[in-house]
Image (spheres, grey):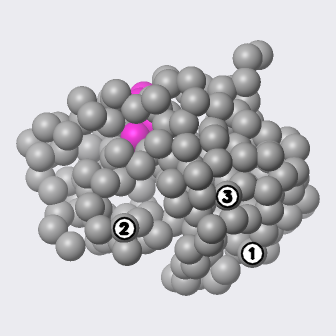
Amino acid sequence: MKHLIREEIEKGMPNVFNSPKEAGVVEAIFIRPVRNERKSLQEVQLSPENGVEGDRWVNLCWVKLKDGSSDPRAQVSLFNSRLMRLIAPDKKFWSLAGDNFIVEFDLCLLRPGQRLSLGEAVIELSDQPHTGCHKFAIRYGQEVKDYLDSSEGVRHNLRGVYATILQAGKVKVGDSLKKIAL
C-alpha cells in the first residue's frame, strides 16, 4: 500500500470536510476478536455491558477503570470513510486501522457528550482521545499519522472518535448514523 505524503493528504481533505454533517451511513464494520486479528462483518450487536459483540474490548481494552475492567469510554470507535478512502483506497486495508465502524459522516465538529443513533443503537461520544499508534504509522505511513495527530487533526477528530454505548441495538452495513439533539 502506498503511503501518502502531507501534500497528498492536504489535497484530499476538502472532500473529507465535505462529509454529511447531520446523517450518514455505516460503510464497514470490523471487530478485533484478539490482538492483531480483524473480522469484517455485515451486522453486529452493540450493548452497554459487552460493547461491540465479538470485539476484544470487553476483556482486552487498552484503557482500564480503577477496578481493572474495560473503560466504557472506548467501547466503540468510528472513522470517517472519505478519509479512509484517501489513505487506503483498497477496502482490504480498512480493517487495519482497528476501528469498529467506518462511516460516511463528518466527525470533525463532534464533541464529547454528542449522542448519535447508530443503526438501532445509541452511542455517546466520549472524552477519550483517539490518536494513532505506532502500528497505524506502519500500516498507513508516518506522515498520515503525524497529520491526523497534529493539533488541527486532533481538533477535527481526524483519527476518529471513541464512544460509549447507551442503548443496545443491532447495526448493519448501510444503516444510518444520525446526530441526536441534546
- Which numbered disc, 2 or 3, marks the residue that appears first in the sequence? 2
Q: Quadrant of residue 9?
A: top left
Residue at image mark 3: 172
Quadrant housing the C terminus: top right
Identify which residue is drawn at 73% across, 37% down.
117
Q: CA gap, disc 2 to disc 3?
A: 17 Å
Quick check: 68 left or right of 35? right
Identify which residue is drawn at 58% across, 30% down.
23
Q: Is residue 169 visible?
A: yes
| Residue 10 x/y as whole percent | 17, 37
Q: CA gap, disc 1 to disc 2?
A: 21 Å
Q: Is the magenta stretch mostly helix, strand or loop?
A: loop
Was residue 40 drawn as part of the magenta stretch in this picture?
A: no
Residue at image mark 2: 91
Q: Can residue 112 be seen in this view?
A: no
Residue at image mark 1: 54
Quadrant housing the N terminus: bottom left
Tag 3, which secondary structure? strand
Q: Which residue extends farthest top? A: 182
Q: Magenta part of the protein: which range?
A: 155-159
Amino acid type for the residue under numbered disc 1: Gly
User: Local crowd at mark 3 within 10 Å, few (<14), some, or many (≥20)?
Assistant: some
